Image (tube, helix red, strand yellow):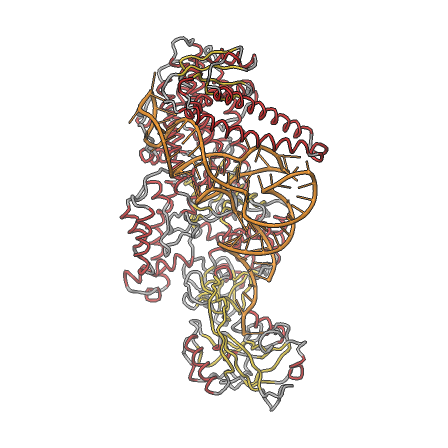
Amino acid sequence: MSSGRRQQEHSMEKTYQPESIETRWYQRWEEDGRFTPSGEGDPFAIMIPPPNVTGSLHMGHAFQDTIMDTLIRWRRMQGRNTLWQVGTDHAGIATQMLVERKIAAEEGKTRHDLGRDAFIDKVWEWKHESGGHITRQLRRMGASLDWSRERFTMDDGFYKAVQEVFVRLYEEDLVYRGKRLVNWDPTLNTAISDLEVENRDQQGQFWHFRYPLADGVTTDAGLDHLVVATTRPETLLGDSAVAVNPKDERYASLVGKFVELPLVGRRIPIVADEHADMDKGSGCVKITPAHDFNDYEVGKRAGLPLINVFSKTAHILESAEAFDIQGRPLGDIDTALPAAYAGLDRFAARKAVVADMDAQGLLEKTETVNNTLPYGDRSGDVIEPLLTDQWFVAVETLAKPAIEAVENGDIQFVPKNYENMYFSWMRDLQDWCISRQLWWGHRIPAWYDDEGNVYVARTEAEARDKHGIASDVALTQDEDVLDTWFSSGLWTFGTLGWPEQTDELKTFHPSSVLVTGFDIIFFWVARMIMLTLKFTDEVPFKTVYVHGLVRDGQGQKMSKSKGNVLDPIDLIDGIDLEALVEKRTGNMMQPQKAKAIAKATRSEFPDGIEAHGTDALRYTFLSQATTGRDIKFDMGRLDGYRNFCNKLWNASRYVLMNTEGEDCGRHGEDVELSLADRWIEARLTQTITQVTRAMEEFRFDHASQALYDFVWNEYCDWYVELSKPVLWDESASEAAKRGTRRTLVRVLESILRLAHPMMPYISEEIWQRVAPLAGTLEGDNDSLMAKAWPLADDALIDQDAIRDIEWLKGVIVAVRNIRAEMNIAPGKPLDAVLTKGSEADRTRLSDNRLFLSKLAKLASIEWLEDASQAPLSATQLVGEMEVLVPMADLIDKDAELARLGKEIDKQDKLIMGVEKKLANEGFVAKAPAAVIDKERGKLEEYQAARRVLVEQREKIAAL
RNA sequence: AGGACCAUAGCUCAGUUGGUUAGAGCGCCACGUUGACAUCGUGGAGGUCGGCGGUUCAAAUCCGCCUGGUCCUACCA
């Protein structure tokens, strides 16, 4: 039998020590192949949003992975054929930049120094070196991912899938190439998508320029010029018109006339276009179709030439380039630019243009305005709209079914309001620019001959074959790579072997749930839906669970520059203060902030961060996982759930100490179940129902809360205490002891099952010790992971037991209250008397005498038939019944009178409230009978309580 | 400018279809080392549910307006 792995310490540490068990269990599960699909049951699949291959785990990942793992473990226990697909993303720009920085630092070289092939080799090298980092961290989180199926968005299979999709889209005219205005990052020298642009507010200058009218024309007001305003004077060089609103009578006579473009001397027309806003400035606007998205549209409508004046690095060209709206070069336009500007970068050119306009008396005025500027979210550089050759996906036909899939409920968002966000974006979708001028990524499968003809095919050979191109004709492949989201858009089916029709694809697609952040709905979710519907005729997933951002305790976004980043691994393992400060201040982009960050860190974490263990971290995330809103990570809760782990651990210690080596009735021996036994089974059943329902509704906060309450407030606080008198009292029968041991063990075993999806490590560790006693361990290598999720059997809900225990608790709490109020030592044995109760109360007393005296620390407890015989006592009410602790000599008369007065006032208020309600005719006439009865019941209850207090007051006053 | 979400105890948050004496954890106060646990136990204090108005017999809950906050989209020539 016991292979070394089965052997365990039989004694448990006094406090829970997560670090000693977590890694061990993860390795064991992985070795035993417990993360692979069982092949039985209904399929349940989650595809992990692939993290950047060279990244490291941040709080957002940890949160997201906890939710996915909880869902996966839960469904696995329910007997589903469960796949959690793992993989990483090549993350084009991010990874390329990272490696570029690395070789700049280490070798002082740029990627151009190395050349494309050598550079890409370096990236692969880096991938192999660092790619395991995040997957190791995922393992620390306990994520039960199927590592045997790990994928990468640039592995061979994905390469095939990407080529296939691109080629098929091209063949259906859904991918096209064209010279279009795109968001251009002059630092990275690549196009980026709208989504990668971050708009930032700032103050800018607003220059008003005079554009002289040509041919001696004057305005109605008699001026020889028009005034246009701009925040980007350098684009003047590329103006191809001035627009006025067609309804603007001031300029009606000028439409069709010309202005002479200052500095350049080009004659440009005055056109009428709705884009010009009559109420803004002069009502005239300069039109630069090659450098502004709105102007591009005006240019399209008015048939204007596109005049590009920028290089790819946003420097002024020696002479401009002119194209028509289709991107064809135009020969008949004067493209000369003033030599003085050639080679200036855009900001220097701006200064120069302003200065020159001013010098010529053409600068009417300068204002300071607030405006927003587009920045590249990777480079931080100002984005320039630039005319370049790019590949696009025509999204209109793809968007339609993608919208319908959500409309008709094939895909559901949780929470639902994100559907609106999705619709509003999808209804107004621009064609998706998918080419990037990068080296790291899927190279576009298009080849060109010397004449510039393009051939799209899966391989060069196929291109030659298909188009009959002789082998002596040189073909060169497109230099560009595809947007990372193009390949990750294929994630749900690409990971399952598409384009092959694999068994996995048939079994696990569509996947069940996508767990993702709202910030990625446009980037990823929408594109996945479009591409997946197109190529599989299936939705990629049935449910999208959208979670919020993990922020710090103050609600700030976590960022390196703010110095408020928490590393999930540090929360698990702990970190000392110096290491934490170093981590937060080392290697900063803005070193001047280091001092303040170090100070803030020292004050927030004077002793560093203690180890909390993975389960406590997971539980914290789950308890804070309110759907769809950001979470402020609460260190206090993390401590609290670490304590919860310890509580569970110690309750288990108690159970083991009292059951190991004892008869727990696991072979069907006779048992006698106590009231407490029946009660805890009933409450367990209710808890199973609650937790299961919460999981079904994705309310992990409710699930974790229900379990926490049950474990701490019911099982530990009451049931364990109630088990002690039975186990430790000599008079209890063997059958009763056996019944209690069996219940202790069985309920704990069920608790561990309920806890497992949320807290996999501690539950497994304890389960291994408890399962033999419960008789649920099957074989040496058994695991809680493989056990069934508990089913609620409503027949076990014994309402009488629940009522009786509530009564018992009531009496015990009443005595404790008396102790506290009278300032009596907790350990001092008291005599108690019950009176004014019903027959049922009397029976309960005789049935529970033992429990009452033990838990309330009573020397005696008696039933008094005639309440008028009661000695002077401290009194508490349990329903109608009074709990009395005789104590004539101990009462502080004045203090007690004051206290009773306050209590009576309190009851008076309650009584008045209810009486008022009942006196309200509208209420009596319209409220449902049940509500009215309830109010009447309350009234009686309050009045009874008041009577007791008044009697008591009279007695004491008479002393 | 349009839209979304949020505002409940000192802090972080629950509060299902309107009917509770409005809850939990942490923190705070008092007492306490009884044989699972001081990462603990017992008891307690603390909220006019952001403001105003409306619907209703009844509003933390539904509606409108306002204030404050977070975010998204668009625009800023």
Residue A292 vs A936, above or below: the answer is: below
Where is residue A872 drawn, in percent x and y?
A: 46, 17
| A439 relative to A354, above or below | above
Q: Nearer the viewer, residue A883 or A245?
A: A883
Assign the N terminus of chain A to one quadrant of the image: top left
Q: Is residue A398 visible?
A: no
Q: Residue at x 35, y 15 (%)?
A: A661
Percent from the top left, x then y, of residue A804? 52, 18
Q: Quadrant of residue A218?
A: bottom right
User: Residue A784 location in percent, x, y?
Assistant: 42, 28
Q: Nearer the viewer, residue A553 or A214?
A: A553
Residue at point 52%, 23% (across, down): A949
- The answer to whether residue A927 of the structure is visible from this angle is yes
- Residue positioned most to the bottom: A216
Q: Is residue A795 left or right of residue A598?
A: right
Q: State the residue lying farthest toward the front.
A: A958
Name the residue: 55% across, 25% down: A946
Q: Position of residue A770 (x, y in %)?
A: 39, 23
Residue A327: image quadrant is bottom right
The residue closer to the viewer here, A571 or A880, is A880
Q: Is residue A177 above or below residue A134?
A: below
Q: How many marks?
A: 0
